[in-house]
Structure formats: structure tokens, C-alpha cells
Amino acid sequence: MSVRQSLLAILDQGPCYGYQLRAEFDRRTGSVWPLNVGQIYNTLERLERDGLVDRGEADDQGHVYWRITAAGSAEAAAWLSSPVDREQPARDELAIKLALAATLPGADVAALVSAQRATALRRLGALPPTTTEPDADPAAIAAAIVVAAQRVAVEGELRWLEGIERMLTETRPSPLPLAAERPRRGRPAGSVRR
Amino acid sequence: MSVRQSLLAILDQGPCYGYQLRAEFDRRTGSVWPLNVGQIYNTLERLERDGLVDRGEADDQGHVYWRITAAGSAEAAAWLSSPVDREQPARDELAIKLALAATLPGADVAALVSAQRATALRRLGALPPTTTEPDADPAAIAAAIVVAAQRVAVEGELRWLEGIERMLTETRPSPLPLAAERPRRGRPAGSVRR
DNA sequence: CGACACATGTAACACGTTACATGATTTG
DNA sequence: CAAATCATGTAACGTGTTACATGTGTCG
């Protein structure tokens, strides 16, 4: 829902045309996440379908400006003022993979951890330095926020992976067999026909 | 792709039926991410469509066992042995929201940060303690890996949010207006008909 | 002239998610 | 008996993502 809500939030500032929306999103998020232009138009149509934006006529320059509706404005405000729900954490592919690898016979967890640690280290080094000058313009502040998020994420990943490595030296996990079948309950064979 | 690959990796251990797959996924990932049963069957059909698994006949108990194919086995092995690509980081809704909030007039970044910090603190306290006994069974190790991932994520989020709070006391971002229009290039109005 | 950025759009697909239907069996 | 669990499936939808088509204006 990030793209959808982001476009809505930007449109709440004033009418924009599709291509412009991408530029605004880029400027305001430090150009970290590339956004395919096609997705913009796609999303705009869905927002229109939901009554959150209106498609304007093309102006003399050929720009199709989209305007936010009252409902859209309300939703944008609600989104911007509500905390992101992290209560039940999103599926983390890396954590899933490592957890599964620790329980499956074919996998080499240690190698996986070590490989992942190498890439994490590289990513950490590739992050731009955080320059928070007190007179930074808002776009720079936004960029700093995003970069900081990436930094803590990578650092956390590193500490996490190191912790796993330590743990694996103490305890080497043995593969976990498929659970033994318990006596069957529920629908017997072929009882559902359509 | 996590669900899809996870099921494939488990099936690489041996044939399973749908309901069983959910239990195995649960056991092997610390029961952290609830998995709707419907999605299992859904995903299995898609895997079959792609030639990665075969649907078996129902046995005398009515269990429909799914078997992995050679192609599926290869893909499972490839997935389990390849590092997760974190090169271009996934979109982080919270980071996007805060970055946007820092550039939009209507939003109260400080309030948002503070609210998010409170929930992060609560989540940190709600995390189960990490008990890594040296003789832990593989499922416990897997669970520990997942919990540790959550812990570093929350801790990182906290440090990040505190950093933003500090930054905001030094520099209060002013809203960033929509970019001024540059002289038009490209397709003029109405030049595309269908 | 050719390459590239600007600009709008369409079509298809992937995965994930949920709601619903159906029914047997166990347990309180 | 009622409720919960086991079990299989269907149908529909949502967002995200990409490939493609089309065309103009600018710059080297």
C-alpha cells in the first residue's frame, strides 16, 4: 500500500500529473526506491476507481493533472497521522530462509549466514554518509531519514547474523524430520464432490 | 515469494498434504507468521502449474499428498543456497511515511515518530526472551533465529526513531512545495489517440 | 540524424490475502 | 448436542511489477 498512499499524500499538496508524481516521490524519499512510471498511471486509475482522485483534462501542455477528492484528502490525512502497524511483523524472507535452513537436511546454514554477512558488510560500506547540517532543506532531511533507516537495518542484520554464527558454533542444528502423522481426523477421502 | 519457496523447500523433504504443510511451516519458523490455509492450496496449485510439484492421489485417509518434481527440487536447492538479495532495499512503509511527512505541510512528523517509538518499545518488551540452550532442538534454534531477527529489527527501529527525534530538535523541516514546472518537453496534448 | 528524456497509457501477470463452502471427527 | 479442530478447496480481489506501444522535443 505504500505507493498508493504515497501518491495520495503528494496529491494532497496539489494537482500533479503522472510523470511529476514520480519526480516528487523521488525527491521526497531520497531517490532510494525506484518507481516504475507505469505503476503511477496504474495506481492513479485505481485511486480514481475508488473515488479518491479525479482525472483532470489535459492542459495546453498536454499534462493530465490529477486532483485529490475530499475522500482522498481524508484518507491521506489518516494515513499520514496513523502509526504503521508493526504488531505482527511482515514476513522476512531472509529470516524465513535461515530458519528453514536450520531445520532442513540439504541446507548449509553456516555458509548462508556467512554469505549474507558479506553482502551486508558491503551494503553498509556503500551507504552514503549521514550529513545532517542544521540548515538542511526538507528533501535532505527526508533523505537522511531514509538512509538512517537503511543503516540501522543493515547494522541490525549484521549483529543478528553474527549472533547466529555464534549460536551455530555452540549448537549445530540437526535436520528436523517431517512430523509423524497423527491419527486422522476430519473429512475422509473423496467426501467432497462438486 | 516467501510462501511459495518455503512450501517448496519443505516438500523437498518428502511428500506432504496441504494442512500438514502449514504445521511444518509453523514449526520451522517459530509460529511467528500465521499462514492462512487457503493460501497453501492456492500456492500448491500454482506450483503444480509451474511443474514444480505433482498432486498425488488421496490416500486411504483422504490426505492429498503433494510430491516435489526434479525441477522443484532444483529450485528449492537453489533458493536455500542463494543469499537473499537486499541490494536494493524493499520499500519500507514506515520510512516512506516519515520521509514524506517531513516534506508535507499537513503532517506532524514529531508526533508520528513519538507514537511509533511507543509501539516499538512495547513490541520490544513483548518479545520472548532468547534462550539458547546448547542442546536445543532444531525447531527451537529456528525459533531463536526468527526472534533474534525481530529483536534487532525493533532495536534498530528504536535507535532510528531516536535519531530522528534528535535531528528534529536541531532542524525542523519546512514543507517542500511541489516542484516548479519546467518548460514542457515531450508529447503535446492529445497527440495520442487509440 | 540519433539518442535520450519526457510523457501517457495498456495489458498481463505474480504473489499474497481473505471470505466462503463443505464436511468429518473429536471433545466438552 | 454444540463447538472446535482437521481438512480441502474455490473465487475474488489487491497491490506491485514489468513489458510494451506510442510519440514529442531537445541536445550533441
Image: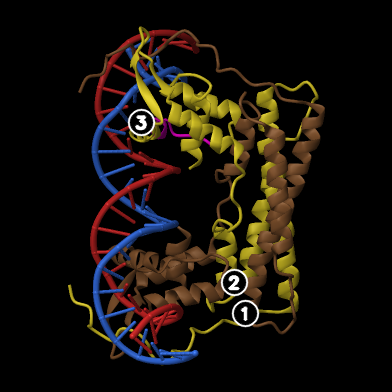
Chain colours: A brown, B yellow, C red, D blue
Q: Label 2 vs label 1: CA separation?
A: 11 Å
SS for tag 1? helix
Identify which amino acid the numbered label 1 is placed on. Answer: Pro
Give the vertical position of B173 relative to A98 (above or below).
below
Q: Which residues are magenta?
A: B33-41
- Asked if badges 1 and 3 are on one and the same chain, I answer no
Q: Label 3 vs label 2: CA separation?
A: 41 Å
Q: Label 1 vs label 3: CA separation?
A: 50 Å
Identify which amino acid the numbered label 3 is placed on. Answer: Glu
Viewer can see residue A58: no
Residue A138 numbered mark, or none: 1
Residue designated by label 2: A30
Identify which amino acid the numbered label 2 is placed on. Answer: Gly
Residue B48 numbered mark, or none: 3
- Asked if badges 3 and 2 are on one and the same chain, I answer no
Q: x and y percent of residue B127 in the render?
A: 69, 40
Q: Nearer the viewer, mark 3 or mark 2?
A: 3
Viewer can see residue A77: yes
Q: Is residue B20 magenta?
A: no
Of A44 and A80, nearer the camera is A44
SS for tag 3? helix
Task: Read off the chain for label 1.
Answer: A
Give the vertical position of D10 relative to A133 (above or below).
above
Quadrant housing residue B131: top right
What crowding class fits label 2: few (fewer than 14 Cα within 10 Å), some (14-19), or many (20 or more)?
A: some
Q: Is residue A7 left or right of residue B111?
A: left
